[in-house]
């Protein structure tokens, strides 16, 4: 009896409450996400089935690995939009980027050669190995250039595991924090899950993102719908996905 009730609850709950995702790797062939247009369209269908109406694709931009530019990103975006149109998939897609905090990032900020989403939000990520020594300095430079910094998936950096004080310090600078929804399923491990829960419990999440790369992420995203904390955070007024 209880199993049937839980199944019914999961079927009724989806992401239509927020409607928009601001972190995915759905653009075909330009990073470690979707490899082909066919892959992109499969992910698009999964997004639709989960209640999303709009996506902001955010391919990686890294100095040594994914050397994307606004031109390569927009070209891939055009290909995806055309594919959605030809296949009658009603999903709005825009593009920004996920910038890696490396030696070239500050230069891009200074030259204003960055891709943003929404109200001039700039998404960036950190090393998973070493804590950045210049994080607060870079956040200030982003703000001085007229952008609103958004730190991608803070729950995934081992040096910040279960350290709500560190996350609060970052957020107090005016930097927004974006949680990967599938972290709540344990997809990235126990420590990441616990940190994600702690961020939610302390009202430190400003954006929800899927960080969708492939269908395994889509499966985990569907699984996350059974999380009580996910249902809780969708009711928090500070979730900025609603503004996209």
Image: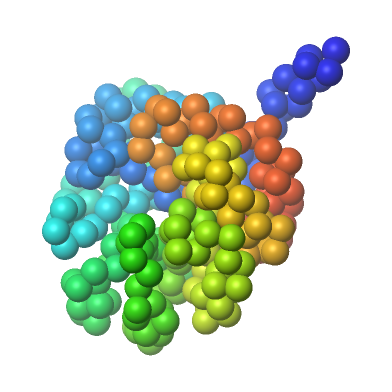
**Which residue is pictured at 63% across the width and 59% down the height?**
199
Q: Which quarter of the picture shows residue 120?
A: bottom left
Question: x%, y% of residue 196?
Answer: 59, 53
Color scheme of the displayed model: rainbow
The residue positioned farthest toward the right in the image shown:
1
**Which residue is pictured at 51% across the width and 32% down the height?**
220
Question: x%, y% of residue 49?
Answer: 53, 27
**Which residue is pictured at 49% across the width and 27% down the height?**
219
- Quadrant assignment for the N terminus: top right
153 vs 27, nearest the viewer? 153
Q: Is residue 205 above or below residue 213?
A: below
Q: Is residue 111 above or below residue 95?
A: below
**Which residue is pictured at 41% across the width and 40% down the height?**
212
Residue 243 visible:
no
Q: Which quarter of the picture shows residue 159?
A: bottom left
Q: Is 107 positioned to the left or the right of 23 in the image? A: left
Q: Is residue 17 above or below residue 172?
A: above
Q: Is 117 positioned to the left or the right of 53 in the image? A: left
Q: Is residue 166 above or below residue 30?
A: below
115 vs 233, nearest the viewer? 233
Question: x%, y% of residue 129?
Answer: 33, 60
Residue 111 visible:
yes
165 vs 103, nearest the viewer? 165
Question: x%, y% of residue 144?
Answer: 38, 87
């Amino acid at each position: 009896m209880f199993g049937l009730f839980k199944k019914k609850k999961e079927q009724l709950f989806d992401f239509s409450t927020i409607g928009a995702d601001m972190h995915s790797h759905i653009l075909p062939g330009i990073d470690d996400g979707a490899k082909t247009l066919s892959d992109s369209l499969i992910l698009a269908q999964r997004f639709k089935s989960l209640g999303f109406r709009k996506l902001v694709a955010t391919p990686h931009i890294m100095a040594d690995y994914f050397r994307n530019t606004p031109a390569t990103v927009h070209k891939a975006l055009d290909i995806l939009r055309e594919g959605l149109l030809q296949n009658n998939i009603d999903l709005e897609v825009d593009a920004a980027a996920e910038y890696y905090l490396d030696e070239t990032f500050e230069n891009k900020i200074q030259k204003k050669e960055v891709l943003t989403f929404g109200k001039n939000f700039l998404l960036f990520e950190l090393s998973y190995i070493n804590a950045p020594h210049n994080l607060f300095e870079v956040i200030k430079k982003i703000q001085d250039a007229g952008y609103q910094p958004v730190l991608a998936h803070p729950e995934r950096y081992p040096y910040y595991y279960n350290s709500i004080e560190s996350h609060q310090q970052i957020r107090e600078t005016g930097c927004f924090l974006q949680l990967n929804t599938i972290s709540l399923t344990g997809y990235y491990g126990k420590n990441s899950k616990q940190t994600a829960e702690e961020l939610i419990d302390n009202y430190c999440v400003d954006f929800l993102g899927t960080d969708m790369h492939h269908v395994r992420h889509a499966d985990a995203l569907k699984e996350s719908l059974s999380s009580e904390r996910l249902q809780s955070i969708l009711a928090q007024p500070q979730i900025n996905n609603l503004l996209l």
